[in-house]
Image: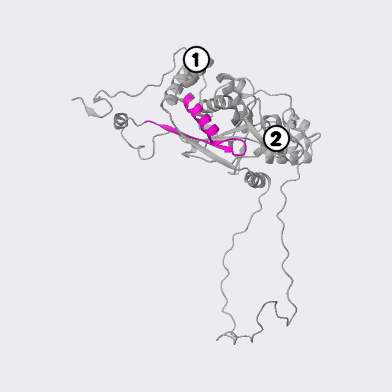
Amino acid sequence: MTSTAEQGSSGGAPGTGGPPGTRDRQVAGTGAFGPNAWLVDDMYDRYRADPSSVSESWREFFADYVPSAGPAAPATQAPPPAPPVGATPIGAAATQAPPPAPGAGLAPVPQAPSPVAEARPLRGAAGRIVANMEASLGVPTATSVRVVPARLLEVNRAVINDQLARTTGGKVSFTHLIGYAVVRGLAAVPAMNASFVPDADGKGTPGVVRHEEIGLGLAVDVEKSDGSRSLLVPCVADAGALDFRAFVAAYEELVRKVHTGKAGPDDFAGTTATLTNPGTIGTVQSVPRLMPGQGVIVGVGALGYPAGFEAADPGSLAELGVGKTVTLTSTYDHRIIQGAESGLFLAYVAECLTGGHRFYDDVFAAMGIPYEPVRWHTDQHGDLEGADGIHAR
């Protein structure tokens, strides 16, 4: 999830991608759009009513578009036929009917009708979400969880934003840095950048597609004018080929397009992994649903002190060595990804966020920050002697 408070305001060139309709036709039908399939249906309805109501890229896409059949309605079973009048059901004992209960012949006492809320059909985006969530039930998933110290992430972000405020302006968010670390992790553990296919050889044999490029989907929460909310997942195309500055520019351009309604079909296709950040609204840990066609979805929790320490005195926190943390989850398709691979992936992301693999060096260089990044060090307490906790004084 991306909230407006976490988007930042970094400028940059528009997001990359081929001509409209290029990436989305790599996969037949709306399957290439994953959770965004409802948007395709909605835009298609608008296109049929008035082609000029959608942008040129959507008109080009719909020129030879064949809509999907949609989710099948559940089969209903007809009730069994009523037995003939006077017939005894098979297997029932032929016994005399019991005498009527006392008061059985009296008229029932009228009861006031209980209020029943009217059911509202789920159509459009809400109906597509139902179909997406039911489709996600067919993906056998498992989830790895890792709590990452966030102090270095917090301090180095502050250094970057202080320098940007004095020079070019703009702002780097925590999600920018975490998202870029996720991209680095997908490149380091390529088994995570994969998709399951039910028929790999035309004979019904299941298979796996190992993607050469990383298409990072960004789960963006959109609030409509009527107060309802929907979820759109634009894709940072070929994210593994971008340095941090280009990644932030592509990220911000996609979010801008989504919130202004200018995103085209090519902005939503090609996702191989998704990043969602419900931590922007305080969620500590999330296990999101994984859509068919993707190998992993990464959930980012709130960045803060562990529960119970929020109101503690800063000096006491420093004395105890209690720092802020962020919880990351990796929910993956267990048919093609194993728990060890997911664990190694989260370990690599955590190592990046704590200064490993020259992560902050590369970030600082890409953003033109003329300083050394803050490094990871173990706390040293002047009043303690050794690890046994014996005071020196």
Seen as rendered, the residue at the extreme left is: 393
Seen as rendered, the residue at the extreme right is: 64
- Residue at image location 57% in from the left, 19% down from the top: 243
Where is residue 113 shown, x and y percent of the image? 58, 69
Q: Which mark is residue 303?
A: none
In this figure, which residue is indicated by the disc labeled 1?
A: 167
Q: Nearer the viewer, residue 310 or 13?
A: 310
Disc 1 residue type (three-letter): Thr
Where is residue 22 shown, x and y percent of the image? 74, 27
Within 10 Å of disc 2 (Cα), the crowding (few <14, some 14-19, many 20+) is: many
- Residue at image location 71% in from the left, 59% down from the top: 76
In this figure, which residue is indicated by the disc labeled 2?
A: 32
Seen as rendered, the residue at the extreme top is: 370
Q: Is residue 262 visible?
A: no
Question: What SS does tag 1 mark?
Answer: loop
Within 10 Å of disc 1 (Cα), the crowding (few <14, some 14-19, many 20+) is: few
Answer left or right for 317 relative to 241.
left
Q: Is residue 326 magenta?
A: yes
Quarter of the figure that contains the C terminus: top left
Report the magenta residues as a range.
Answer: 323-351
Question: What SS does tag 2 mark?
Answer: helix
Quarter of the figure that contains the N terminus: top right
Does residue 215 lie above or below 90 as drawn? above
Res 205 quadrant in image = top right
Q: Is residue 328 visible?
A: yes
Answer left or right for 184 relative to 257.
left
- Residue at image location 62% in from the left, 28% down from the top: 254
Q: Nearer the viewer, residue 378 or 224?
A: 378
- Mark 2 and mark 1 lie on one chain; the one further toward the N terminus is 2
- Figure colour scheme: one colour
Where is residue 180 shown, x and y percent of the image? 54, 25
